[in-house]
Amino acid sequence: MAPSAMTRWTKSLSGARPVSYWLDDPGRPAPEPALTGDDRCDLLVVGGGYSGLWTALIAKERDPERDVVLVEGREAGWAASGRNGGFCAASLTHGISNGLSRWPAEIAKLEELGARNLDEIEAAVKRYSIDCDFERTGEIDVATEPHQLAELRETYEEMAAHGLAGGAELLDADALREHVDSPTFLGGLWDRDGVAMLHPAKLAWGLKRVCLEKGVRFYEHTPALELAAAGAGMAIRTPYGRVFARRVALATNIFPSLVKRLRPYTVPVYDYALMTEPLTDDQLAAIGWQNRQGLGDSANQFHYFRLSADNRVLWGGYDAIYPFGGKVRAEYDDRPETYAKLAGHFFTCFPQLEGVRFTHAWGGAIDTCSRFSAFFGTAHKGRVAYAAGYTGLGVGATRFGADVMLDLLSGERTERTDLEMVRTKPLPFPPEPFAWTGVALTKWSLARSDANGGKRNLWLKTMDGLGLGFDS
């Protein structure tokens, strides 16, 4: 990148605030009071992101008389649920290719359950009047290199062979650029119905409102510090009190699990995004984007991008940063060198938009596991359930995870608990320094693959064989 180009592009960041655009909202709800003293309930949910919010809500939908408490260390939706791109996908397996490679015998069922889950999210948004800019636009996977175009064609053919291509459409360069115009686009694969766009923070805040209306007792600024058996149930210790519960659902995702044996199964990977100022009518016309689909390019180090309700462009991804030791720290949420890189990539994709300014630049941790899609289970003799490892595709899949946790806590056998995906776990990550070294080598190898026509080196082939890898 030439210095003059770097200077031109980074000027676009001069007014960017280092905070999630979604959370920077005067309509953000006030927090509920912290827990002081002791409380008792049938079900305790730990975590106020999507995973916990859906669990509390569905628990009350299944049994309105169930006494439910939710504790959250800060405020509902403040972490990944309020910082993501707002892509709400039907896929439960981090995309069809990952699902086919891991659970080919179950893929039809997994796709059916995922589609049903997305339909149920849309129905809940309507039923509870959650104003979260929900748009069932679909998503286009975009090829910007010839080998990516071939890979998208192979994916489509594999989907067709399994009878799963009904909602998909291959687009050549001209057809794609009728939807969105970039000189870098060579073609794409459009999932017409399997992805919705939404305002992620407003979804979290809406779910919080509905939980409160249904009688969930909500304690914010109440971190859960310790989990222990207490008679026939469990107890959670917090800074100013305790909660005694018959059953506990752990929805803490990237934050250290209260079941310590689970901690090696996830690592934090930091993802970053930019948000532009609203586009003018002329700027929007210059790039088309009439159908407002979400987009993602098909590189290993990929970008995701979409329009907000007020026609800003969110542009994120590419860098996926793993900090040595796997620590989750606020200081990692802001990374100017990544913002500069993303700005350059943005104007390379959309040179028509040169002169547009970014108003927000932010980052945060994603809970990544080695199979790239969530895993589930129980602890403490079935009195505790957990779901984690969504690997950046949790906006929709967390609702499915909530159903799984409630199924597991009930002890009932369901179509969800019968899944091999639910009954098995990914491989854990090794301790340091091996985890950091492995992630660094994998990132380097993925970058080389992108630069060399998608060819995978020996390291990547070995990781593929072991079911390990790295993705954002």
Image (cartoon, rainbow, N blue to C red):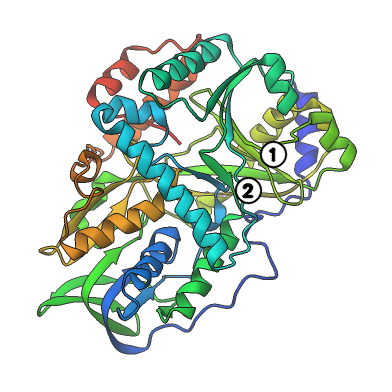
**Relative vertical location of residue 102 with respect to residue 217 in this rendering, above or below:** above
Q: Earlier in the sequence, mark 2 or mark 1?
A: 2
Q: Residue furthest right?
A: 282
On the image, the x and y values in percent for residue 17 come to 71, 54
The answer to whether residue 207 is left or right of residue 245 is right
Labels 2 and 1 touching (C-beta < 8 A): yes
Residue 42 in sight here: yes
Cα distance in 3D space between marks 2 and 1: 9 Å
Nearer the observer, 122 or 273:
122
Image quadrant in which you'd find residue 340: top right
Query: Which residue does the image show at 22% across and 37% down from the upper left?
Result: 427
On the image, the x and y values in percent for residue 352 come to 83, 28
| Residue bearing mark 1 | 292
Image quadrant in which you'd find residue 7: top right
Query: Which residue does the image show at 27% across and 18% down from the upper left?
Result: 462
On the image, the x and y values in percent for residue 175 come to 69, 19
**Relative vertical location of residue 30 with respect to residue 109 in this rendering, above or below:** below
The answer to whether residue 221 is left or right of residue 39 is right
Query: Which residue does the image show at 18% across and 53% down from the upper left?
Result: 261
Q: Secondary structure at mark 2?
A: loop
| Residue bearing mark 2 | 135
Query: Which residue does the image show at 64% across and 56% down from the upper left?
Result: 19
The answer to whether residue 17 is left or right of residue 79 is right
Residue 323 in sight here: no
Q: Amino acid at mark 1?
A: Arg
